[in-house]
Image (cartoon, rainbow, N blue to C red):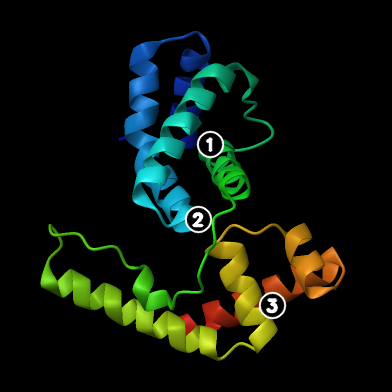
Amino acid sequence: MLDSADDLADLLSRVAAKDRAAFASVYRTASPKLFGIILRILRRRELAEDVLQDVFLTIWRRAESYDMTLAAPMTWMVAIARNRAIDEIRKARLTVVDAPVEKLNLADDGILVSERMERDDSALRLQRCLDGLGEPQRQMVKLAYLEGWSRDALAKKYGHPEGTIKTWLHRSLKQLRECLGS
């Protein structure tokens, strides 16, 4: 594992020079997180795997454009993954259902029962906290953070300015943090 963003940035600079070993290290480090983000957006494992492959091809090709002064390495890669997943939704015109949060847990045969119970309890707590939000805010949070909708898309859907959407999302997240912290 890498110790810092600086280590990952160094690896990306080596990837820009087409260093395959550095690329393998970036893949090992970033792929679990990127796959999770893509899967949450697409909700189809086989499609998420294909998109992840495309994301890493993009990282390989565009590593020289990474600028550490603009974003942390993981932030840069997450943006690529998120945008590529959203592009896939638009391209395929996938329909996304509004699944309850507890249904989003993925089965993993290697997980301990105690860990599964803890995760299920966390999902139930999150659902209760989401239920405490007003209806438009709850839907906006789900669309933005589970389905990857942009503020612009939310503004168009709800007929409010982007700044209002940003404020509502910020307040909703603050309320969720407070609810989950108690």
Q: Nearer the viewer, mark 1 or mark 2?
A: 2
10 Å crowding of disc 2: few (<14), some (14-19), many (20+): many
2 or 3: tag closer to the N-terminus: 2
Q: Name the amino acid, label 3.
A: Arg
1 or 2: tag closer to the N-terminus: 2
10 Å crowding of disc 1: few (<14), some (14-19), many (20+): many
Residue 182 visible within the image: no
Residue 87: image x %, image y %? 61, 43
**Residue hosting label 1:** 77
Q: Nearer the viewer, mark 1 or mark 3?
A: 1
10 Å crowding of disc 3: few (<14), some (14-19), many (20+): some
Q: Quadrant of the N terminus?
A: top left
Circles 1, 3 touching at the beta carbon (< 8 Å) = no
Q: Is residue 117 left or right of residue 4?
A: left
**Residue hosting label 2:** 41
Residue at mark 2 to residue at mark 3: CA–CA distance = 23 Å
Q: Name the amino acid, label 2.
A: Ile
**Residue hosting label 3:** 171
Q: Nearer the viewer, mark 2 or mark 3?
A: 2
Point 44% across, 28% down: residue: 7
Secondary structure at badge 2 equals helix
Residue 28 visible within the image: yes
Circles 2, 3 touching at the beta carbon (< 8 Å) = no
